[in-house]
Every structure is written in C-alpha cells, then in structure tokens.
Amino acid sequence: MPTPSHSLSAPGTPGRVCGTTGLGVCLDAQRFIKLNAVAGIVFLLLGGIAALLLALTRWQTVHLLPVDWFYRILTFHGINMLILWILFFEIAILYFACTTPLNARLFSRKIAWVSFGMMLTGAIMVDYIIIAGKADVMMTSYLPLLAHPLFYLGIILVAVGTLVGVFNFFATLYVAKRDKAFTGSVPIVTFGATAAAIIAVVTLLHGAVVMIPTFTYSMGWTPQPDPAWYRLIWWGLGHQSQQVNVCAMVSVWYLLSHIIVGARPINEAVCRTAFVLYILFINLASAHHLLVDPGVGATWKIWNTSYAMYLAVLASMVHGFTVPAGVEIAMREKGYTNGIFGWVTALPWKNPAFSGTALSVVIFGFLGGITGVTLGTQQINIIAHNTLRIPGHFHVTVVGGTTLAFMALAYYVIPLIFQRDFIFRGVARVQPWLFGLGIVLLSFGMSFAGSMGVSRRSWDIDAQGVYGPAAHLWLGVLGIGGVLAFVGLLVFALLCVGTLFFGPKIEKRAMADWGTPPALAGSQSGSLAHDHYATKGTIVLVLVFLACFAVYYFANWKALADVWPVR
Amino acid sequence: MSLTPLTKPWFHAPAGHEKIWLGCAVLWCFVMSLMMPYWHFRGKQNSTGEAYTVKPADFLARTEKFVAANQVGTYKNTQHNALMPELPIVEPPAGGDAYLIGRMWHWYPALRLRLGETYRLHLSALDLQHGFSLQPLNMNFQVLPGYDHVLTLTPTSKGEFTIVCNEFCGAGHHAMSGKIFVE
Ligand code: HEM
Ligand SMILES: [Cu+2]
C-alpha cells in the first residue's frame, strides 16, 4: 500500500498557495502557527503589564507596588515572558520552518493539539498559582525556597508540551525528506530552526531532571535536592534555552532580510557551521551563572565559560557579519552603490519588519553580546553577579534582540498566515522604534545602577542607606525606559489583536506592501556574488563593533583590579 | 537563498572581507579565552569556589564560638527600617578565620578587619540561599545553605562597608544587611 505523500503538492493535501510569495502553505500548520502565535502574544501582554508595574516599582521615586506584590509580579513577569511568550512563539516559528520552505505538510494535527493543549494547561496552572500568592519564588525557584506543587507541575507540563511540539517538527522534517518534498539540504531558515530545536531538546531534558525531583519534594514524597546541584541543572535549562532563542532569532534575521531586501547569506557553508557551533558549544553554559558559587572550582568555571575558544560567541560574530553583509550585497546589486554607507540610508526604515530586524541586530550585538561575554567572564562576574547589570544584559538580548525580531516577524506573519492586512499601519511603523528605544534606556538604567552595586530582585534600595543620587538617577532612567517599552509592547499587542478582528481581509491578492527598496536602473541581481570586497560598509561596522567590545571588556578588567584581592 | 534548499556546490572558502572578519573574530575569542587563565595566575581577584559541606547547625555553632572568643564591641544599626538593630562586632586574628552567617534577614556578626591583613572568610546560609554583596565595593559571592564558602580576602581600603543580600530570600530580602569595618 503506498503511504500518503506529505509533500504539499500531492493531491488532496490541505494546502493553499500564498498570494504574495507564491509559496505553498499547509493549512494544518497554518492553524497551529495561528494558535501558538496568538497564545504567545497574549502572554507577552500579560508579562508586559507586569513589566510596567516592576519598572514603576524599581524607579525608586515612584515605588509603586507593596513588597509582596513586587516579588509576586517579578515571578509572574519572568515566567510569562521568558518561558511562555518565547516558547509559544517559537513553536509557531518551528511549524512554519518545517512546512512552507520545504513545501511539506505538518506531520500530525493530533500531536500539534496535544502539544498546544499541554502547554496552555501548564501555563494557566503556573500563572494561577503565582497570582494566588502560592509561588513567590522567582522563576528560578532556587531551593530551599519552595512553591506550591502546581507551580512545578505547570512548568513540567509546558516543557513536555514543548517537547511534543518539537517532536512534530522533527517528524515533519523526516517525512518531507523521505517523500522528497524538496531536494538538496534544507534552507538556512529551516537549518537555524533545526539547530534551535536540537538545543531545545537538550535544554528541556535538563528541565525534566531538575523539575521532577523538585516537584516530588514539594509533594513531600522525596527529600530535598541539594541547592548547588539544583543551580547547576536548573541553569542547564535556563541558560541553554537562551541559545534556542538566539538560533530562532538569527533564523528570523535571515528570513526577514531575505523577504524584505532580497538578501542571501554570503556564504552558506560558514553560516551553517556557525549554527552547528551553537549546538556543540553551549552545553555547559550553566557555568555562567555559577561563576562566584561555592563548590565548583576555578578550572571548571574557566573551562566551561569559554571551552578554550568561545566558539558560541564566534558563531554570533559570524552571523553579526553575514546578515548585514547579505543586506549590503543585495542593496548594492539593486544599484545603491553610493560610498560606503549609501545603501544604509536607502534601506526601508519605515517598514516595521525591517526596522525591527535591524534594531534587533544592533541591540543584540552591540549591547547584548558585548555585555554578555563580559559579565560571563569568570573573574569579572565578581563585580556583576546578581546586580542589576544582569537584567540590564538580558533585556538587550532576549528582549531587544529576540522579542523585537519576533515582533518584526509578526508584521509579515499576520498578513501572510492570518491573511489580514494590518490596521493603523502608520502606528505600526513607529512601534519597533519606540519599543527599541525603551528597551535600550531600560537596559542602560539597569546596567549603570548595577555597576553602582544596586542588586537585582530588590524591592527597595533605600533600606540599606548605601546608594547615592547617581544610582537613583539611573533607576529613573530604568523607569522611563520601562514605560516607553511598555507602550511599545502594548501598541504591538493591540495592533495584532485589532488586526485579527478588523484588519482588511486578504483572499487571493498580495498583502499590502510595507515598503521594499526598488531596484534602480542598472541593477543586476547576482552581479556581486563573486566580489568578496563588496561589503565595505559592513566591514567598517563590524570593526567598530569589535573596538567597542574591546574597550568595554578591558574597562571591566580595570574595574575588577580595583576591588579587594580575593581568592 | 534563505528560503530555498541548498544545492551543490555549497562549499566556498571564506574570502575577502569575510575572511578578514573571521580572522579578527577568531583572534579576539582567543584573547578573551586566554585572559581568564592569565588572571587566575597573575590577577588578584578570583573566585576559586573553595567550599566544604557543612550542616547549618554546625556552622552556627562555629560562628557562635568565633563570636564568643573574639567580640570587641556592639554595632547599633540606626537605619530606620533595620531588621537587626544590634550586632556583635567581632575581630578575627590577622591571618585567621572569620565566620559570617546569612539568614533571614541579616548577616551575622559584624566584622572588624585590619587593612592589608588576609583573612579566611567563611560564608554560609542557615535557611535559604543568600547573596554576599559588599558595598560600595560591589564584590559579589553566592552563599548556599549546606556549603561553607571560603573567601581568602585582603581588605585594601579603610572605612565602613555594608553587606547587602542580592539573592532573593523572601519579604525582608531588600533590607537584609550586615557590616564590615576596616581599620
Ligand atoms: C516592556 C518591556 C519590559 C520591561 C519594562 C521589563 C522590565 C523588567 C524589570 C523592571 C525587571 C526587574 C528587574 C529586577 O528588579 O531584578 C525585569 C525582570 C525580568 N525580565 Fe523584563 N521587562 C520587559 C520585557 C521583558 C521580556 C520581553 C522578557 C523576556 C522575553 C523579559 C524577561 C525578564 C526576566 C527573565 C526578568 C528576571 C526575572 C527574575 O529576576 O526572576 N522582560 N524586567
Ligand atoms: Cu538574603
């Protein structure tokens, strides 16, 4: 008996042809992309409301929330943002990456339902128990702090549900390959998504290893796991999952720069190797969180910080070059050849998906990357651990980088998958700028206050009497940035939800164009494919980046040298 | 192309600008990797993670003994919302061991140290995890229950220093503090 083909072009397959791109879209995948994306955006909005309350509390002059609610809302914010928003949206991205680019249909509708159902149930359990005040333990829930068992159970459900979704992704890939839905190696967007999925499996297994005994302990069935062991394994989940976000974000960079500007990776072999480096060299990244911990020695810390080569950092530096380089080549081929940066001014800065992507690259690289590597340097961590410098770092990676890239993606996902054009398109055009600016201010406020010793997760810095006016000023910057970012986030959520209800329907026509750079006279696609010195602007940009990196890095060694000797 | 499958021949050796950048990036990653072992041997500030398992009750007993033997005064906290209005001030012998307990919500006891002397500072927690954060220097170390975390520390500046807690430990966390005086 012949097995039914999983290629989208096979007869009787639930598919449609996209009126904008001409690509095939699997209707099952489309449904689950919708469900997961909408769920993600709802959790983003919940986490965003929490974010506003937090920013207005850490802004010491406003100091909004009472103490118990501050820690409750902080727990809520961490879970809804870092876990729920990101995971739901990533599942949507995975379902896209394994179907449309491969001309394949989703492996199983049932499995997709199971995954979605488990994730949603788990998410509601966790959110409920936090707001009920029974889990004021922060998202890290460091033992011996103990939450209600539903908290751990909910997280386990979300994690297993995600694993089930990831399984559906791999099964789709496998079947598409088997049925020859495509030939050659998968496109780079799918390749990056696959890297993300592989890391996600490793990550979520760490999650199971740490969360299950903690759950059974919270039920009183087993003794308390060791706190140091808990930290080691928990961060195997917590930090590695950030590499999932990086992979997904970089894939989105490749996807959007291709859709909008027509960019192609300048060297597929190098880009793909970089993704493989992410998979291979992030495995003990939990070390970054244990750099000033007892019980793990200096050799272990140093080795696991860099694996002698910082190969995962190298991978990011590769993408940080190839993404803008691809854009530059595409622009030059279109005829924007003026000087070194002529192509930059001609970019479609009013296209929210483009500005979102560009800001994501810049914020992630210049701010997130530089601070991350520096704070994660074994000894420098002494002057940074658990200060506000840490949230100052990750709000420019997972927020200014990943979240902003995902927002940018939504400006195409909603027209192409939900088949509705955006309402209030003028407002959408400023949204990424507003959100980006807010996050950058937030991060500066956090980072500078943190350098003055202000700790993270602290309700009131005046209880100690040790922080002066400068620290208070930076907390004000944090507050203002937080409010701006919140407005940017709210506008995004309202635009998306409003569009789902009221956006003009797209049936067979193409989506309304956000703006793409037109080809000028004399443009020639592919003409620079073999000119290896055509990326003049990009090479200048990355060298400036490297200089900033070196200055910041060594300034921190200098600051470290000024504190008391310690071993 | 980003959305279409990759076909042969797919391998191209990096060239031109890409090669320049790869070279710079590899070099820089190498420099950063070497900085850590370099600092481990030549630098003065390191976190070696020296630690011994200890039962909270035993650590408390050691600390009480240390306080009884070396108390030199009493510190009165005048901060309006101080959770611990009074702490013994204890001066460990130069070159000797000092004990510091983190618990909800203060650091016990207050320490008096001498400029330029080296001490073995034992840190542990009795209840939850706490964060040893010495201000305004901004030196931070993790403190776990069940682990005696030993810092070999040499004060090189005089004055009054405050230990803040920077690991969340419940409702009084923000006000959890302690003192080190250096003379
Ligand atoms: C409107 C945008 C946002 C604002 C204003 C904001 C603000 C804040 C503030 C003020 C804190 C508390 C810092 C502290 O006291 O330790 C915080 C913590 C945090 N935020 Fe955000 N944030 C935003 C968006 C996000 C997003 C999108 C994510 C993840 C994707 C995120 C992840 C986190 C995490 C993981 C924490 C740490 C929670 C913890 O310490 O347990 N934030 N944020
Ligand atoms: Cu504490």
Image (cartoon, coloured by chain):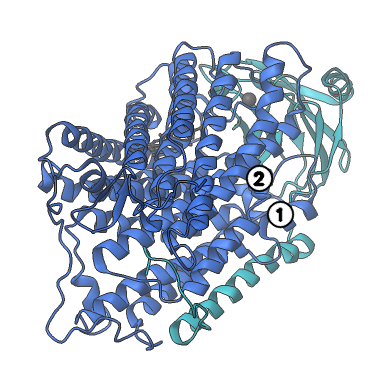
Q: Which structural element holds mark 2? A: helix
Task: Confirm if mark 1 falls within 8 A of ligand 1.
Answer: no
Looking at the rendered structure, the kind of residue marked 2 is Ser
Residue A111 horizontal/vertical position (percent): 49, 33
Dot 2 falls on which chain? A
Q: Colour of chain A?
A: blue
Label drawn at residue A304: 1
Can residue B107 be spotted in the picture? no
B112 or B30: nearer the viewer: B30
Relative to B133, does residue A114 appear above or below in the rendering?
above
Tag 1 and tag 2, C-beta contact below 8 Å: yes
Residue B28 in picture, x, y percent from top left:
58, 72
Q: Is residue B183 left or right of residue A338?
A: right
Query: Where ligand 2 lies, by quadrant?
Result: top right
Snapshot quadrant of residue B37: bottom right
Q: Which mark is residue A286?
A: 2
Classify the position of the N terminus of chain B by image quarter: bottom left
Q: Are marks 1 and 2 on the same chain?
A: yes
Disc number placed over residue B112 in the picture, else none = none
* Mark 2 nearby-residue class (10 Å; few <14, some 14–19, many ≥20): many
- Provide residue A315's location: percent of width, then percent of height: 54, 65
Q: Secondary structure at mark 1?
A: helix
**In cyan, which chain?**
B
